[in-house]
Image (cartoon, rainbow, N blue to C red):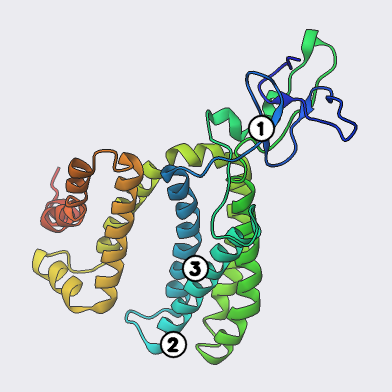
Amino acid sequence: MSCPGWYCGRFLLPDGEISDCGPCPRGFRRNETTFICEPCMDSPTFYDWLYLGFMVLLVLILHCFFIDMVSMRRSFSKDIIILHATAFIEVVLSCILSLLLSHPMGYLTIQSCQVRTISDWYTLLHNPTPNYEKKIHCTQEAVYPLYTIVFLFYGLSLVLMLLIRPWVCRKYLPRQSKMSIYAAMYFIPILVLLHALIGGLLYYSFPYLVVILSVISCAAHFAIKMDQSISSLILTTVVEPRNIIILVGHWCLHAYGIISITQLTNPTVHALLILLVPVPCLFYIFTARFTDPSKTHF
């Protein structure tokens, strides 16, 4: 009854017989004791939901970034806010539809197979060759549905954007805003390709990527300002609503990264770490004057 490799299993045939070793059907994974393919009945862990949330935030942030970039405005206006709200609605609808279309269909929840190792994301690379003779192809979605649900979300995001955004762009900033649609038609396929190739690596590294990129992005936000004095950096941040929203967004991402790393296993201690979220911002403001190239002498 045993099967070679890590993912090959057997399943019951309609006539009551046991199949040969092969890939388990979608939504099934082999039992390591009996080697029989069993349905995935686990609930996603807190970390799994954080990973899916990261994939959602990635699309939303890129939408907002390109909308802000193509608008070429240093302050928020009614048109810009409506475009951002439209992108938010598109992403939320895509999330809801992705959950509803996943098993069990019609519910805002999913049943999954527990992720055990990084190889679970790359079963294509672990097809066994018993006795170095004939290879048995057992490629399957061992991390069901964490792999395919992201593709479903990306596809729905692209479709909903093409159905909703052009009507909004036609009324608000018709010249600039249409460029945000073109940008999404590029970055969403790129995200699909990245997920297909390095989805497993992202699953294990996204908390650290969020923290590092939020710090770098926060520093870049302050670095583009001409006046790098402490008073100017603080004043422009506090007075301008756009800068406040951008800074709070960076803090939320930083907090999200900390929560993903710690998973709040020790709520008291890990909640205190969230209080350190403003530290990178304050560090930049109070040390920017020491990094002025004009004051560096060799």
Where is residue 263? Give x, y as percent.
Answer: 33, 42
Residue at (44%, 63%) from the top-left corner?
61
In three-dimensional space, the C-alpha distance between marks 2 and 1, rounded to whole angstroms, equals 49 Å
Camera-side residue of 51 and 34: 34
Give the vertical position of 121 relative to 51 (above or below): above
| Mark 2: secondary structure | helix
Q: Residue at x 49, y 41 (%)?
A: 203
Determine whether label 1 and label 3 are within 8 Å by CB. Answer: no
Is label 2 or label 1 in front?
Answer: 1
On the rendered image, what quadrant is the N terminus found in?
top right
Residue annotated with mark 1: 29
Q: Earlier in the sequence, mark 3 or mark 2?
A: 3
Graded by Cα atoms within 10 Å as few (under 14), some (14 to 19) or many (20 or more), the crowding at tag 3 reads: many
Q: Nearer the viewer, residue 122 or 244?
A: 122
Residue at numbered disc 2: 79
Q: Identify the residue position indicated by label 3 in the image.
A: 63
